[in-house]
Amino acid sequence: MIGGIGGIGGIGGMGGAGSVGGYGDHGIWRRRLASLRRLDWTLILVVFALSVVGALLVRSATFQLLTEQGKDPEAFFKRHLLNLVIGFVLGGVATVLDYRLLRAYVPILYVLACVGLVLVLTPVGSTINGSHSWIVIGGGFQIQPSEFAKVGLVVLLAMLLGEPRDGEVGPGRRDILLALGLAGIPAVLIMMQPDLGTTLVFCATVLGVLAVSGVRKRWLTGLVGGAALAAFSAWFFGLLKPYQLARFTAFIDPSADPRGAGYNAQQARIAVGSGGVTGKGLFQGEQTGGHFVPEQQTDFIFTVAGEELGFLGAAVIIILLGVVFWRGLRIATQAADFFGTLVATGVVCWMGFQTFENVGMTLGIMPITGLPLPFVSYGGSATFANMIALGLLQAVHVRRRAFD
Amino acid sequence: MNSRTHFRLVVLYVLVGAMLLVLMGRLWTMQVLDGAHYRQIAAENRTRDIVVPAVRGMILDGSGRALVRNRTALVVSVDRTALARQKDKGKGVLDRLARTLGTSRADLEKRIRLCGPTVKRPCWPGSPYQPIPVDDRVDPKRALQIMERQEEYPGVTAAVQPVREYPEPEGAAAVQALGYLQPITQEELDKRKGLKVTGYSGVDLIGRDGLEATYDSDLRGEPGFRKVLVDSQGRVTGTAQEKSPIPGGNLVTSLDAKVQEAAEKALENGIKSARSQGRKADSAAAVVMDVQTGRVVALASYPTYDPAIWTGGISEDEYEGLLGKKKGEPLISRATQGQFAPASTFKIATLTGAIADGYDLHGTYSCPGSYMVGSRAFRNFEGQAHGSMNLHRALVVSCDTIFYKFAYEAWLRDGGMKPKKKPADPMVTMIRKWGFGSRTGIDVPGETPGRIPDRQWKRDYWNATKNADCKAAKEGYPDLERKDPGRAAYVKKIAAENCLEGFAWRAGDAANLAIGQGDMLVTPLQLTRAYAAVANGGRLVVPRIAQAVVRPDGSVARRIDTPKAQRLPVDPKVLKYIRDSLADVPKSGTARGAFAGFDLKKVAVAGKTGTAEVWGKDDTSWFASYGPADKPRFAVVAMFSQGGTGGGLAAPAVREIWEAMYGLGGKKPALKDGKLPATLPKLGIGSGGVTGRAGTGAPS
């Protein structure tokens, strides 16, 4: 634990040495120490705790199957630890960077994200679990651009909506339409993968940032109404893939097709429900050991927590995530500038919705989509994106208003 | 920060908080409130019940020789539901399996399709939810290949299973008596309590005919089960609970393999000889019964078939060969299900009817060549006149005209064509007492009751046929007229007669009944029992094939007693008179030729021949006998449909059986001291069906 934090500090220092920071005059070391103290340590500790728990759950979800397959039972665990280390490094870099300078790079980031999302749809991309969401680099590495696009979206929205014209309370109509338009392009590209879950995360984030940016209420109601209309017509004109529809019907009645679409939902509920108050013990889950729940190390990681750690353990995870959102919103409130507020808001909306959707689907109150649980699920791109977002929060926090 | 942003951030706080509360609430409901429910589902989820079938009991003869036993076989089965779950509906799996088994996918698909009204065999008549055996003669190497590469053969299992085997001890097959097994249907499965079969085949066979059907619950035993732990792929990871199966009991019958073989051989020889004389000889039956107890020693029927075809699925061709009319419908046991006119063998019963009607047992009666029944002359067999004689001689030479007289006079006393309100019908009344017209109650299913063509039957029959007859009476038979005008005119006249008064009990009907001709039908088993009653002094026994159910450890599970015999309302003196008469039939009567050279001093056989005329067909040949005449032990009856005279065909066949039983004519005696074993055979441990494991089928 201590080593991990030390690592962040060290990276921060190295970043500074690269003279990227904005405090490049006197007393550089003193200020650096001061900014280290200004970090939101609660947030770091909570995320670290979630990461440790997540790593253990990933191990529990995979070691049995890997053993049966004659592979290294710790392969996923080790890989995840490596991902976490890289993630913390990326987060550290994001912390040290002056997020305000990011604005200059947003267009480049945006274009990169869109190029990535387009590439995914070309033969370069690979299909995993029905979604064309991955670019396989080789050597066992693969990138999921849509995860990074979430970071890009947050920064883009903050830039477009975070600088209201003089005398305006919120962003003007042009800003809003531009934001919607620019957010819409990657959203449509992600929808084409098809990745409904991430698209919904995009919508939630756009809506949340728009709301906090101070747009008039009629914009919000109009958008929600428009989204409802779009959802209805997607269903009505058959734009949804059959499996997506099936997931929704399975969500309503999981026993309808227990071997098909309802299987995941039902097995997830059984795993969580059978955990009881105290759970069956880490690595002791029978449903987990028998790998009844598919995608258990990624989208259904929460079922491992539910079965093995029980209500007490699963509730702690939810509370820890709640602390993350609380700290995020606190950072939004205390940010030095509006851009920072919106960046923090965007990150909270993104992760908040993603958490609700992910946990909700394992508990059978949300339809099944392919979304990881922030900071807990296995997955390199997701871990990296989450940690960069964490870094952005810290960056905003470090540069907060000086009243406290 | 402006106030609107601040307010909306507060709203976001609340939203996030609410969201987390919802998740916590739901988590609490699922894990704490409904936890027990989910734990139970989880347990069911992780386990599969595998039925471990009990080894089915053997069927043995009275000396302990196995007529049916089990052999272990590697059976490859296919699970339809698992196939349907494949992307290509299992085509790939079946292709690979067909290559491994050396057959074609089309063939496998035929075997696993469900039987229906329009689906021809091969097809699966059992439950669609259980694995369907497609091959029970796989060599172990290939079976191992299937088991080891389960990922290539999802839904396919290979398991060691007991399979029925018919060793035919001493050459005795007794197929119709033994019956056969067939897959249980879904309805039967649902009815059967406490046996929910999942993931196993072979256990779900049920006795469909013969002893296998009657004693199914004794033979089947009690299947055990194994609760195994499985992962999501259905791979077994351990055993949670186990209950061993209780093997089925062995059924000891009173059949004697050697006598049975002799009976089967006698039928085969008889058929051969009749056919060599240009007769059709389409079917035959023979019964050997212990006259004192009703225990059946042999029950043979011709045509027969090889029972081995039942295992491993039966093909369309084989099925046609079994049930098809072309092959003579060998599934039908002629001994219990065949119904034929008994002809003169029937006279033992009609004679007692006449005596009960008041005729003098010791009187003298004339036996002319023909007798006028009303306006029609009823002729003796081959028109022979024998002059005056007593009833003893009437039986020995089989005089018909005396019996016409008995029947005609009784008919007249009942009012003739204008019958009394309550006609006495002495013959019909007595025949019924002899057990004709109703089932004997033997312990195999499907027995037929035969037919007594009495007044009621005539009326029912007329009601059913009068329309056709009246039409034919008007229009005649144009087709027949072109070929044979004389015959056409004759049948037209008959039709006209039937149309007008077919309901009536006519003098001719009574006369025909008296000599067991016309519409009177009996089964060979009924006739055997009647002769047993003559032999044992008037007790109408209930035939039984099974004697006892013996557990595999040798202890007796239950004895199968013969029901109490009914007494014939016939004076023992009359029966003695009949016995004395029948003893002379092989010596000097109609069976004299057939028993020439037979050592009657050693085994005094008494009997009666019968030759039934069947309209449009060859004669039915009968010989009904019992012996030894001084101390009767067995009744032996043989019947050949379309075989010729009783003395010429059935009597020699019966002689063959007697010779085999007592070791005459240079044969080895089948029975020790001419008796059946007095005690049940000793069956030691290990003499039971199959040893070794059974049921290692992986769950689907």
Image (cartoon, coloured by chain):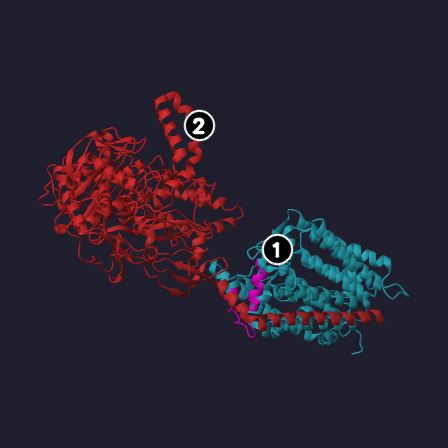
Chain colours: A cyan, B red
Magenta stretch contains residue A39 = no
- Image quadrant occupied by the N terminus of chain A: bottom right
Given the image, what chain letter belongs to the residue carrying mark 2? B
- Residues B58 and B47: in front is B58
Looking at the picture, how far across and down is residue B343, in whole percent?
A: 25, 38
User: Label 1 is placed on what type of residue?
Assistant: Gln
- Image quadrant occupied by the C terminus of chain A: bottom right
- Residues B644 and B148: in front is B644
- Residues A404 and B677: in front is B677
Q: Residue at x 40, y 38 (%)?
A: B462
Looking at the picture, how far across and down is residue B346, in whole percent?
A: 24, 42
Looking at the picture, how far across and down is residue A256, in whole percent?
A: 59, 57
- Is there any visible trace of residue A335 in the rendered image? yes
Highlighted range, magenta: A263-288
Q: Quadrant of residue A398?
A: bottom right
From the viewer's perspective, tell me whether residue B463 is left or right of residue A134: left
To the question of a shared chain for discs 2 and 1, the answer is no
Given the image, what chain letter belongs to the residue carrying mark 1? A
User: Label 2 is placed on what type of residue?
Assistant: Lys
From the viewer's perspective, tell me whether residue B328 is left or right of residue A316: left
Other residues around mark 1 within 10 Å, as few (<14) / some (14–19) / many (≥20): some
Q: Is mark 2 in CB contact (under 8 Å) with mark 1?
A: no
Instruction: Give the structural element (helix, strand or loop) at label 1.
Output: strand
From the viewer's perspective, tell me whether residue B280 is left or right of residue A309: left
Residue at numbered disc 1: A142
Residue at numbered disc 2: B474
Q: Quadrant of residue B286?
A: top left
